[in-house]
Image (tube, rainbow, N blue to C red):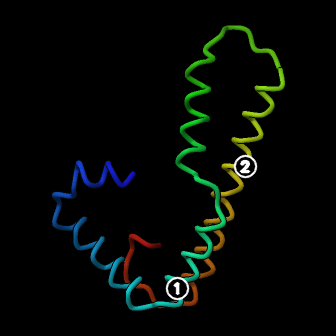
Amino acid sequence: MLKRWVVSPLTSADQIRERQEAVQDLVKYEKLRSKISDKLKVLPDLERLMARIFTYSVKSKVKAFYVDMQAVNRLDEFKQLLECFEELQSTMNTLFDNFPIKSTRLL
């Protein structure tokens, strides 16, 4: 994701302002920043997990579907990914309720 941001930077003034507001809020509220950081440290690498699930779905374009252990494992990975996103969303909502954030990008 970082590579994508470096290769294709924002060109819209409104998007740049939104990002600046988000950075200002994170700099202003150190407690919020540290809580977000702590939460992100315990999560698995979501981008890698999504890429692995996508790669599997592209490779397995078969007409007949059968359940084997590999398919079950991939479904478990997908379930884990969804649970991580749900947990992250609820945590962030709880955190942002406690701080007067101006940035719409963080919400």
Tell me if label 2 and label 1 are in contact, CB under 8 Å: no
- 24 sits to left or right of 93: left
Q: Quadrant of residue 86?
A: bottom right
Q: Quadrant of residue 15?
A: bottom left
Q: Which residue is mark 2?
A: 80
- Judged from this view, the residue extending furthest toward the top is 63
Whole-percent x, y for residue 38 in the image: 60, 76
Between 33 and 21, the one lying in front of the other is 33
Q: SS at mark 2? A: helix
- 39 sits to left or right of 47: right
Q: Amino acid at mark 1?
A: Leu
Residue at 81% from the left image edge and 31% from the top image edge: 72
Q: Amino acid at mark 2?
A: Gln
Q: Which residue is mark 1?
A: 32
Residue at 23% from the left image edge and 48% from the top image edge: 7
In this picture, is 28 found above or below 79? below
In this picture, is 55 found above or below 10? above
Whole-percent x, y for residue 102 in the image: 38, 84
Residue at 55% from the left image edge and 45% from the top image edge: 48
Between 57 and 86, the one lying in front of the other is 57
Residue at 73% from the left image edge and 9% from the top image edge: 64
Q: SS at mark 1? A: helix
